[in-house]
Amino acid sequence: MTTASTSGPLFRIGAVSKTTAIPVSTLRIWQTRYGAFSPVKTEGNQRLFGEPDVSKALLLKQLIGAGHGIGAIAHLDLEQLRRLASQDTRATSPSPLLILPVCLAVVGLGLANRLESSKFAAVLSQHRIQVTDVLEDLASVSHAPLSDKPQVLLVRVSSLLDTVFSAIQTLTQRHAFAQTIVLYNFAPDVVVQSMKRAGMIVRRDPISDGELAELLQSILFVDRSRAQEFGDQGAVIASRKYSDQTLRRVAGISTNVLCECPRHVAELIAQLASFEEYSQECLNKNAEDSHLHSYLRAISGSARSLFENALEKIALHEGIDLRESEVSRLQQ
């Protein structure tokens, strides 16, 4: 049974209904007959629901649509419901190339609720988004181990300071996230630039649901089957593996490959990475063309990631050391 927290925002049942697209009458039945929620009661006997209730309503709706009975799942908590939804996804998927959802670890319960809404399912029709882990804030990270292996870390913070950057870096170093996206309200430009150099996608909030969906779309492989064919696992484009300095070093190496593949491939990766970054900036600045720019970023990122795999095969064949120098890591 979920109890709404008075420390977070509270919502009337009509607002919950609008957010989740679940009729008010259904929410009342889930509450009174099955005990799915325990809303806070005001002095005027008005029921107010917390963000955990919104999350639970969305998950109940998803699982009921998958064939579960409300009576069998209403008593489960959020973690149990998410685990059940994840198991359903793996068990009912018809094809290994289409089934695997994009798994996210989300810092911020309100942000997790947005991702589990029907709006995101509609925009990301070719990719299923699965919120596998939800952390209330960065402070809870140290004592809240992740239950699954999310590919994407999505963080929502108010102020983006050096200490916050360090906490996010600690989290990304502990887990092998393919991409990290950070939404913020206020931040010094120097911190934002440092995070971008570290390979993170940083975006000022507030952004609309549509813009957030496009941002997620921009980190997904355009063609998952081709990505797996060429050695990439999953649906998420990994962040850059090699700095511009390392690519310049590889491009300048003389090898036994007559067609100069190392040089050409290294130069292509650098150019694609530049266009990928340019497309991301366009996505940030121009909401009207966000769909086009998210697609362009996904195209360039997909190609860049595949060429990085190609460069690794060439390097193995030619005995080229692709390890990043300490200077390269600091400059990224």
Image: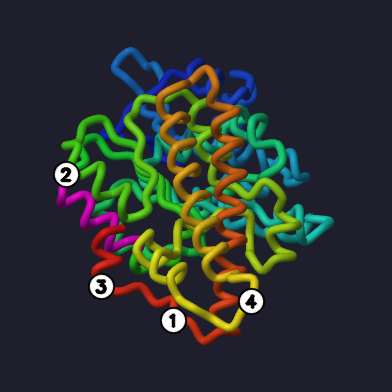
Which x, y percent locates residue 148? 52, 64
Image height of 253 relative to 32, above or below: below
Q: Disc 1 or 2, which lies upstream in sequence?
A: 2
Q: Secondary structure at mark 2?
A: loop
Residue 234 picture quarter: bottom right
Local crowd size for mark 1, using a 10 Å CA cut-off: few (<14), some (14–19), many (≥20): few
49 to the left or right of 161:
right
Q: Principal SS element in the magenta part?
A: helix
Q: Amino acid at mark 2?
A: Leu
Marks 1, 2: nearer the viewer: 1
Q: Is residue 286 visible?
A: yes
* Marks 4/1: CA–CA distance: 19 Å
In the rendered image, the vertical position of residue 11 relative to residue 33, given as above or below: above
Highlighted range, magenta = 162-172
Name the colour scheme: rainbow
Q: Which residue is pictured at 65% across the width and 52% down the height?
A: 101
- Three-letter amino acid code of the residue under disc 3: Glu
Q: Which residue is mark 1?
A: 321
| Residue nearest the observer in this picture, 174 or 140 | 174
Disc sitting over residue 258 in the figure: 4
The answer to whether residue 81 of the structure is visible from this angle is no
Q: Between disc 3 and disc 1, whose residue precedes?
A: 1
